[in-house]
């Protein structure tokens, strides 16, 4: 059983560049979550989707961040333009059913460094 | 959503010993989940305990829940080096947001 797949695993880019992170959830899962983890702020929920529709994006830090889920098997998180303070590990997670009742399955993350 | 607060922040034990960590939260919950994160990896779900349950076991893991005290504990028995990781609790009220605290870093020394 393939888990949640994220790509790339590592990304190093210069300030001002566009960054696109990708996620393939577990087949059959109808919820998808994007998180950011830093030493200072811990693990923060950015946005989540249900059946490909964004439900809550209140955690998205600012307009430079956007997320899409064009179909049930693919989601992207885009940062444009990127800034050094965006450096973090970004995780994607998916679940079958609401998190209130079901566990979330996490990918291994994308470690993003903005120079 | 609400955040769980784990205690202690860090824990160091010898292989074979038990490790206990606690989680406190502030409002009523439907369930509480525990996750583990190994270095450089994503979080892995360990146990989900519902608000009407008091104790749950999974292998060497034992989770308790005391809703009157708004607290939960995770016990790892007979620890192994592979248990070295950070452990997070996530209390769940209504809604779908998991909110994680800073976690407990556990180091199991051989």
Image: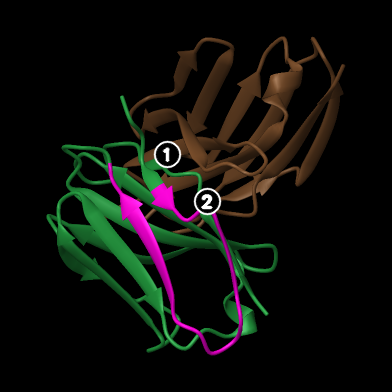
Chain colours: A green, B brown
Quadrant assignment, res A86: bottom right
* Magenta-colored span: A6-25
Residue B53: give x, y in percent of width and height.
Answer: 37, 25
Q: Residue under mark 1: which chain is it in?
A: B
Q: Secondary structure at mark 2?
A: loop
Asked if residue A14 lies in the magenta stretch, the reply is yes
Of badges 1 and 2, nearer the viewer stands 1
Q: How many marks?
A: 2
Residue A51: give x, y in percent of width and height.
Answer: 12, 55
Q: Residue under mark 2: which chain is it in?
A: B
Q: Which residue is mark 1?
A: B32
Q: Secondary structure at mark 1?
A: strand
Numbered badge on residue B25: 2
> Can residue B1 be spotted in the picture?
no
Question: Dot 1, how many residues are within 10 Å of its Cα: few (below 14), some (14-19), or many (20+)?
Answer: many
Q: Report whether B70 appears left or right of A57.
A: right
Asked if residue B4 lies in the magenta stretch, the reply is no
Quarter occupied by the N terminus of chain A: top left
Q: Is B5 above or below relative to A1?
A: below
What residue appears at the point 51 percent right and 41 percent down from the top-left corner? Answer: B43
Numbered badge on residue B86: none
Give the camera-side residue of A91 and A58. Answer: A91
């Amino acid at each position: 059983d393939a888990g949640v797949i994220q790509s790339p695993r590592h990304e190093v880019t210069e300030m001002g560049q566009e960054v696109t992170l990708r996620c393939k959830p577990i087949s059959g899962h109808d919820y998808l979550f994007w998180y950011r983890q830093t030493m200072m702020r811990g693990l923060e929920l950015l946005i989540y989707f249900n059946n490909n529709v964004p439900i809550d994006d209140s955690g998205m830090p600012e307009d430079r961040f956007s997320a899409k889920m064009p179909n049930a098997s693919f989601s992207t998180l885009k940062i444009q333009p990127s800034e050094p303070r965006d450096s973090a590990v970004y995780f994607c997670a998916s679940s079958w059913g609401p998190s209130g009742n079901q566990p979330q399955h996490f990918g291994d993350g994308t470690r993003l460094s903005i120079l | 959503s609400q955040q769980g607060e784990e205690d202690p922040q860090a824990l160091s034990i010898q292989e074979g010993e038990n490790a206990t960590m606690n989680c406190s939260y502030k409002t009523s919950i439907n369930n509480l989940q525990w996750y583990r994160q190994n270095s450089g990896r994503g979080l892995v779900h360990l146990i989900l305990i519902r608000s009407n349950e008091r104790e749950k076991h999974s292998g060497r893991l034992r989770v308790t829940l005391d809703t009157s005290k708004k607290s939960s504990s995770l016990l790892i028995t007979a620890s192994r080096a592979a248990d070295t990781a950070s452990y997070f609790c996530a209390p769940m009220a209504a809604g779908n947001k998991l909110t994680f605290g800073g976690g407990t870093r556990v180091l199991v020394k051989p």
